[in-house]
Image (cartoon, rainbow, N blue to C red):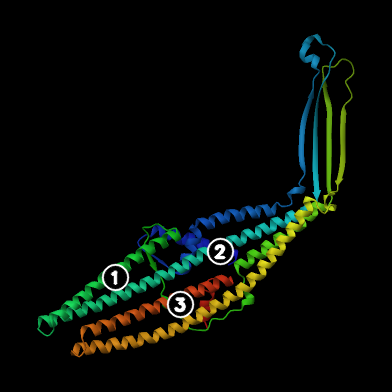
Amino acid sequence: MNKKSILAGLFLAAGFYCFAQNNTSQLKLTPDQAVQIAFKNNVSIARQQITLEGAKRAKAHSWNSISPSLSAGVTADVPLDFLTAGDQISNYSSAIGINAAATINFTANLYTAMEGAKISYEQSKISFEEALRTVEMNVRQTFYGLLYEKENILLQEENLKIARKQYENNQTKYNNGRLSEVDAISAEVNYKSKIPVLENARTVYENDLDSFKQLLGLDPEVTIELDGSLEDMLFLETVSVNPEEACSPVLKDLEIRLASARNTVLDRRLSAYAPNLTARLSWSDQSWYSGYDGDAPSAKKKSSVSLTATVPLDGVLPWSSKNDGIDSAKDNVKDLELQLETERKNLKRNIASSLRSIKQSQESILYKQANISLAQKSFDMTSEAYNRGTKDLLTLENANTTLMNARVSLNSEILTLTKAILNLENIMGLPFDTLVKKESNK
């Protein structure tokens, strides 16, 4: 996600958020719109933005160690006798003078300081991007989780509707003397037992929806309508990626830390061996006198330039603290190189594992789709047989339960597939929804 797209998204989110606040009756959100609103309102992103701006400022001013140190002053000379004897002294002189100085320090560490500020800025950018990805991952996972709960409510409502229809039909049959009281009571129990199940599903959905509003930073009174369906994520094309193209946030963080460690080694070497140069320019002018008898004293003007070069000698001693500091910095570089190599191997394993999970989930979806077709056919045939009196109520209820469970299981598997794809995009460092759009457009 580049900076331009982030800024464009934030502007879009700002306008969309204002619209939402002024139209609290209903807010229709797609996953992308939800993400942009979360970007605008999330506190962790705002804090990372402050850190990023500070690092950018430090990078721009990283050369300031060679900025001149300037000073200026005014001096006044008055005889001590005049201050104590006052008018009894007739022959004295007082003087006023000004002075200025500029000092510049040139060190070989200027390069490493500038490089360190640049690396620190890159680290801040990585942290900012990771904060964005974390928020987006949470928003998308929660969004699709809510879609699953919403689909579950629809299935529970349909299940309740079927149970109610069975109950009403059985009541009619019982009143006409065509059904036993036991079967009529069983149908009523089956129907009423599904009411609290539906209410519980609705309560869970509303509670999770409130948490989603909090994640987006929206007012609790805003009514949200989710614009999407789990079927939007239902595709069975083979997902393929190139592990060599992975740009994992963890890898990027280790690489920038390794660059910083190598810069630290160079910085400590320069501190131990490189000379330092100091240039100083000073100027003074004492030309103003008063209270004198006779000729005025000569003006006193002075200016000078000095150059000082110092060479540290601690580096020639192998047991010195500076040499120990260099060795410690080298050890840190070796450690980070090992971590980086290990993470590259882990990344390949994680990508392979994610691809296997996606493939397994896709195969499971095919199997569960077939199960739904069979369960639907079984329910229709059982319902018809029950109406003819050749199947009992328990068999019909079991067929309905089997169909209901098959549908719920399919939705659950689609949600599992969705999360697996989001996880793969996250560990690959890809923009979210990249794989879905790429595979859907085949």
Q: Residue at horizontal 71%, vertical 56%? A: 116
Evaluate if marks 3 and 2 touch, with contact meaning CB atoms under 8 Å apart: no
The residue singled out by tag 1 in the image is 198
Residue 332 visible to the viewer:
yes
Query: What is the tally of numbered marks visible in this picture?
Result: 3
Gap between marks 2 and 1, in whole Å?
40 Å
- Give the answer, above or below, for where 145 lies relative to 176: above
Distance from Cα at disc 3 to Cα at disc 2: 24 Å
Q: Is residue 221 above or below residue 235?
A: above
Which comes sooner in the sequence, label 2 or label 1?
A: 2
- Circle 2 packing at 10 Å, graded few (<14), some (14-19), many (20+), is some
Circle nearer the viewer, 3 or 2: 3
* Residue 425 found in image quarter: bottom right
* Residue 173 in the figure: left or right of residue 77: left
x 66%, y 52%: residue: 57
x, y percent for residue 21:
41, 57
Asked where in the image residue 91 lies, by quadrant, the reply is top right
Residue 7 visible from this viewpoint: no
Give the image location of residue 105, x and y in percent: 80, 46
Residue at 87%, 43% in the rendered image: 307
- Where on the picture, by quarter, is residue 431? bottom right
Q: What number is the disc on residue 233?
A: 3
Sequence-first tag of 3 and 2: 2
Q: Indicate which label's residue lies in the foreground, 3 or 1.
A: 1
Reading the image, the residue beneath label 2 is 6
> What SS does tag 1 mark?
helix
From mark 3 to mark 1, how far is it between C-alphas? 25 Å
Query: SS at mark 2?
Result: helix
Amino acid bearing label 3:
Met
